[in-house]
Amino acid sequence: MNGPPVPHRPDVTLTDLRAEHGRPALGLGTARPRLSWIARPTGATPPAWRQTDHEVRVTAVPVVPGAAPRAWTSGRTGSGDSVLVPWPAPDLASRERVRVQVRAWSADHPDPTAWSAPLEVETGLLHPGDWAAVPVGPDWEEEPGTDHRPALLRREFHLPGPVARARLHVTAHGVHEVEVNGTRVGDEVLAPGWTSYHHRLRHRTHDVTAHLREGANALGAWLADGWYRGRYGTHGGNHDLYGTRTALIAQLEVDLADGRRVVVTTHPGAGADGGTWRAAHGPITAASLYDGEEFDARLAVPGFSRPGFDDSAWAGVRGYERDPATLVAAQGPPVRCTRELRPVSVLTTPSGATVLDFGQNLAGRVRIRVRGNAGDRVRLRHAEVLQDGELCTRPLQRARATDTYVLAGDPAGEEWEPRFTMHGFRYVEVTGWPGRLGEEDVVARVLHSDLERTGWFTCSDERLNRLHENVVWSMRSNFVDVPTDCPQRDERLGWTGDVQVFGPTAAFLYDVGGFLASWLADVAVEQLPDGTVPWYVPMIPAEFWDPPQPGAVWGDVAVLLPAVLHERFGDTGVLRRQYASARAWVDLVERLAGPSRLWNTGVQLGDWLDPAAPPEEPAAARTDKYLVATAYFAHSARTLARIAGVLGEEADAARYARLAAEVREAFTREHVRADGRLSSDAQTAYALALAFDLLDEPRRETAGRRLAELVAQDGNRVATGFAGVNLVTDALTRTGHDATAFALLTETGCPSWLYQVSMGATTTWERWDSLLADGTVNPGHMTSFNHYALGSIADWVHRTVAGLAPAAPGYRRLLVRPRPGAGLTAASARHETPYGPASVAWNRRDGELVVDVDVPLGVTATVDLPGRPATEVGAGHHRFAVPDAVPALPGPGAPSALQPT
């Protein structure tokens, strides 16, 4: 296999080799992982690279060091693909570890690249029969329908020789943390996260080789209710959503240096070595995702996960059933602490309370360092806003969001952070702190799924920069294992409509390919047999929303979000996996609409949270909810036709294209008046009709003009809710009303995006006026300061203000089309595409618009600048200068010469 050295070209190197959606690739849940890599130039001048061929080399990594490795090669495949390339080798077995390398050829050079740096890929437990573990939990009585006190579990075991490799496969009914010989395993938070537990329970694989030793060893675990059976849901929520008892599912597989394998599993009886699992209560006396955690340090159990600990007084465990076919490997990254923030100030409120201001609304919890007497009780109460100088907890509804720590009295001081809760907050009220509270004593720990950041934007207007940063923070706060609506109140549900409108923005800012593909798998399993998509996923009981009824915008996520993942990540696999779900949704709407092709029945949220809607009637929008439903019907049918075409389902492609055309005709017949106006003369109605291409050309011009008139009549204020917020600026720019789109973006009067910024927002809000101009919180029952749906404007900002957009799946082609608006003197966007970094930066100076464009290897870009014909360019850096056609009015931001960073 090695042979003599093969010449290779030195000007291109292959980097970032990855399997599926992440690195490292440990515990993969597929025998055929797709591979991706990036071609990068090694010098300043990129070559004319266009991959025409590649070869993959796979080398087995033996368990026992020193064993002879086996190798396999694909040979030259004849494929120019480098993104999510199908696995070319024989299927991997469970637990198999291989080293993968790739090299590639381009038409401009006879020699291949050098082999890439190796990527080690290891599968997990791929088959139900690989699981020997069963769920086990404490063997004591618990009352259903109440919070259960978290438990500790432990087991000792003996290893009869030196360890070569050890893997821990673990998940839980509930949330867990695991320790081996006194050392915590991994750094994820609230594992295993939240899925549709009845159908899919995620597990992760951990390398614990370094934690083990020959002889006596011990496993320990913390276990709490979490989403599995803790109180969850709106209107007070419910307990026992998935089961009445928590349990740990763990399988430790240890390969010894002499070739033997020792397997230690969760099991209610004695293991082969005579060891048994034992259970006891620990220092956590209460833990709830909504209400917070209570921890009594006087009850600490030091050393419980070490061998030799005396557990003779501990209780036994009981076993529970779990179909191992429902255990699935995680696709996306876990929740972790990604950042720490110190308080920016310590406030004393008018009532005398002490409140910490962290300067940023976030999702997470705090860590404290405190010194005091045994029994001292420190209470931490969290909230997003202050009102009249005091902590405002009304928006939390029935979430107490309060953590309590009881000191052990250690004279050296104590450090504590909750394990099994999280909060949405900017402010923390501290009660009972012994002595002086300093800013250095408390730190906010930011929690969210540890997604890779891939997109950035900046411009010369600091207000827009703050708006964009608010969008990022709201995404971080709500991409906590599930794409939720808000992180602070007793809700935090995976609302389908919110992520449907925000998906393109999310896919620019972070690599959400695996995260959202996993969530979409839950959408499919939660979908009703008739095709109804629940309002939120995972689906749980919640009064009005149960049983779910089909609703436009929300249910359309089954079609539109997979299409976004294909557009932004080049992921055809997610289209195939979700295809049946997408078809079921469109087929359902077709039946509901009937021969008229008008969806004008049933429960519809329509243009939810139109700013004109009364606080307690958020669905009372200016746009007819059935106009919204029919518009989305047409859009999803057309999108499904395109998906079918990509998948080679030609008959379906033709059928759904005909259906989309019929719905478009029905929309025109029902909702377009003789004078060209729509039946709902409102911003959202025109935005939908234009963005979804529901009008012929003469009517498009009329509709665009009328939309611009409505925006002007409203004083350039936003008049859309969730259904139109991500479309209104696109509708304006597509019909030549760029100036109106910019006026809408930069308006500061309420309702507007910059009104929130002017009111000091550090995240985007649920309502346009969550905080009223007088500083009081909106009186509506439902008021959050950390929702991302209204932040979907950022996608238009990336594509149109900065001018960076995909023109082919996975950004294989780029569209560079900046449209500078009055007042801005510079803007830039950078995105880590699947092919490498792409960026656009423009500056207006000396009567010219100067545009710098960076294109990755293997990618082409269409550069469409004002006043000049579109130009095709290849990889590398390109600079263009054209006459500045838009006068630079005095803007609020200082001019700057911005470049992508």
Image (spheres, grey):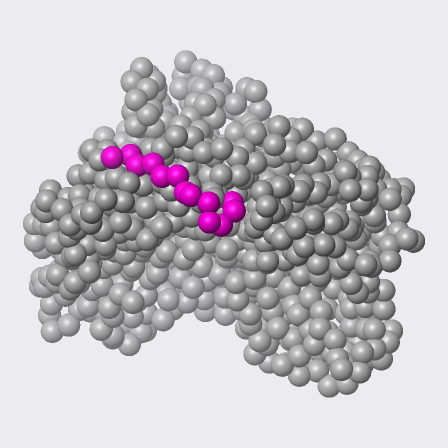
Q: What residue appears at the point 35 percent right and 61 percent down from the top-left corner?
A: 456
**In the orientation shown, which residue stands out farthest toward the bottom?**
436
The reply to whether the magenta stretch includes residue 768 is no
Q: Is residue 350 left or right of residue 115?
A: right
Q: Is residue 277 visible?
A: yes
- Eyeballing the image, is 533 above or below 516? above
Q: Is residue 689 left or right of residue 521?
A: left
Q: Which residues are magenta?
A: 63-75
In depth, the one of 303 and 323 nearer the eye is: 303
Give the main secondary structure, helix, strand or loop, of the magenta stretch.
loop
Q: How many numbered marks does the figure carry?
A: 0
Q: What residue appears at the point 32 percent right and 19 percent down from the top-left corner?
A: 649
Q: Is residue 821 left or right of residue 757?
A: left
The image quadrant where one finds the C terminus is bottom left
In the rendering, at what x and y percent does residue 441 appear? Answer: 66, 79
- Eyeballing the image, is 428 above or below 622? below
Q: What residue appears at the point 58 percent right and 48 percent down from the top-left corner?
A: 257
The image quadrant where one finds the N terminus is top left
The reply to whether the magenta stretch includes residue 71 is yes
In the rendering, at what x and y percent does residue 640 appear? Answer: 36, 27
* Residue 749, quarter of the rendered image: bottom left
- Eyeballing the image, is 638 above or below 852? above
Q: What residue appears at the point 71 percent right and 73 percent down from the top-left corner?
A: 415
Q: Is residue 377 visible?
A: no
In depth, the one of 246 and 239 nearer the eye is: 246
In the rendering, at what x and y percent does residue 607 appear? Answer: 47, 41
In the rendering, at what x and y percent does residue 709 appear? Answer: 30, 49
